[in-house]
Image: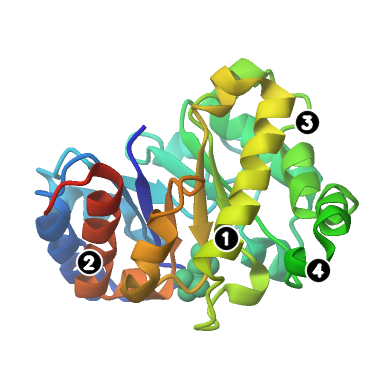
Amino acid sequence: MNPLVVGNWKMNLDLTEAYVLSGRIATGVGSVGGTDVVLCPPNSFIFAINEYLKAKPTNLYLGCQNTMYEDEGAYTGETSLKMLKPIVKFAIIGHSERRRIFSEDDALINKKLKYILDNLVTPILCVGEKDRYQLEEYYEHEVKKMSAEGGMLRQIELAVKGIDKQKLRGLVIAYEPIWAIGTNNAATGAYAAAICYIIRNFLVEKFGSEIADEIRILYGGSVSSGQTREFMLQPSIDGLLVGGASLKAKEFIEIVKISAEVKSGRKF
Ligand code: PGA
């Protein structure tokens, strides 16, 4: 499967800035082959950006940063996929900021995951730990902790609860350690690779390798172009979820180019 680079703009920019950024990125990534790129602007800009980009490159998709789990109803302030679906192909859920600031719990994320899959949109399920796992000293113990209450594997387990595994083909899991998000203190390639490998093994055990092979695992948390090679050289990492650096066109395009080069061996 193609590597995947996702830009999560969070709640940033005004409309003019969003046009400029999306336009520059569309031009910059259009010639980068074999890599899927997703822009996740604030929901309120999605339709305008889609119009603005009209002839988007085929490897560039739009995604939303969140969705309600029903099409319509008395949910003040929410947006559903019924509204966004004509345009968005991906939907982020379970981001640590939603879990922390908006108290989204695993049960809610499970509802959203079901809803997104029913709408044939690709979910980008975010999971991650608050405090760095001490894999170097306590490997077995820390892996056990991942499956216990509040652990990173437990978050995956609860998110997919009750979902037919056949529906999970194409799912994207973004491993985002909370201690690395927005801190300029990304995990090392080795650390991120170890955790993504643990996630991969967990998926193989739970769903079988045929389905697990169709699930992409991304790393996210203070990703920059400087560290992109280090992450993408890891066989267990299929792509990146980029926050702050996705707001800078040149930097984001560089991240996409390096990702494509490392995974395909071609120069862009
Ligand atoms: P960051 O954000 O790259 O700014 O750390 C990543 C994210 O929160 O998705």
Between discs 2 and 4, the one toward the N terminus: 4
**Tag 2: Cα neighbours inside 10 Å, few (<14), some, or many (≥20)?**
some
Disc 3 to disc 2, how far (Cα)? 37 Å
What residue is shown with label 2? Answer: 254
User: Residue 15 at x, y = what percent?
Assistant: 26, 70
Residue depth check, mark 2 versus mark 4: number of the one nearer the observer:
4
**Tag 4: Cα neighbours inside 10 Å, few (<14), some, or many (≥20)?**
few
Disc 4 to disc 3, how far (Cα)? 32 Å
Between discs 4 and 3, the one toward the N terminus: 4
Between discs 1 and 4, the one toward the N terminus: 4
Q: Of the residues shown, which amino acid type is indicated by label 4?
A: Glu
User: Residue 208 at x, y = what percent?
Assistant: 65, 20
What residue is shown with label 4? Answer: 137
Provide the secondary structure element on which disc 4 rests.
helix
Provide the secondary structure element on which disc 2 rests.
helix
What residue is shown with label 3? Answer: 161
Left or right for 264, reference 133: left
State which quarter of the image contains the N terminus.
top left
Q: Of the residues shown, which amino acid type is indicated by label 2?
A: Glu
Question: Quarter of the image holding residue 77?
Answer: bottom right
Q: Of the residues shown, which amino acid type is indicated by label 1?
A: Ala
| Residue at image coords 71%, 36% | 202
What residue is shown with label 1? Answer: 192
Residue depth check, mark 4 versus mark 3: number of the one nearer the observer:
4
**Tag 1: Cα neighbours inside 10 Å, few (<14), some, or many (≥20)?**
many
